[in-house]
Image (cartoon, rainbow, N blue to C red):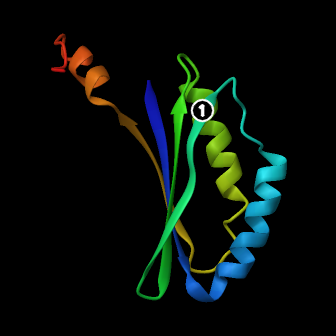
Amino acid sequence: MPYIVVTTWTPLAKGKQVVEIYGKVRQKFPVDKTLTKELIQGILKVEGAKSKSISISKVKEGMMDKALLRQQDAMVMFHDVEGLEYTIDVYFDFPETFSMLGMQAPD
């Protein structure tokens, strides 16, 4: 199964604003277990004048389109935070990647 990885960089001065918005996002977009399994709600570290946070969700089979649209809709709520940047990436685990190549992953 593929994974959706969201990485967000937030200016330290905007941390409280982002936390407030995050609470609203979680209310409006609670984890939809029919689309994804949340593996990491969020991990965070400071990099210079910004914090970097990462969340990872495992996408259920056949649900990638819906899961990505839902993730993007949630991230729109942060668009007014000055200086905030984010990426939404899709990753595949090694067994799935090997399978795409018609091979079997080693143990």
**Viewer-closest of 102 and 78:** 102
Residue 84: x and y in percent read: 57, 73
* Element type at mark 1: strand
Q: 40 left or right of 100?
A: right
Residue at 57%, 57% in the rendered image: 42
Which quadrant is home to the C terminus? top left
In the depicted structure, whether residue 88 falls above or below residue 32:
below
The amino acid marked with disc number 1 is Lys
Q: 65 left or right of 107?
A: right
In the depicted structure, whether residue 25 falls above or below residue 12:
above
Q: Name the residue under label 1.
A: 37
Residue at 58%, 22% in the rendered image: 63
Residue 79: x and y in percent read: 66, 66
Residue at 19%, 19% in the rendered image: 105
In the depicted structure, whether residue 26 falls above or below residue 21:
above
Residue at 31%, 21% in the rendered image: 96
Q: 23 left or right of 105?
A: right
Which quadrant is home to the N terminus? top left
Q: 76 left or right of 7?
A: right
How crowded pointer 1 is (Cα within 10 Å; few <14, some 14-19, many 20+) is rated as: some
**Viewer-closest of 56 and 9:** 56
Residue 104: x and y in percent read: 18, 13
Can you tell which quarter of the image residue 106 is in? Answer: top left
Residue 6: x and y in percent read: 51, 52
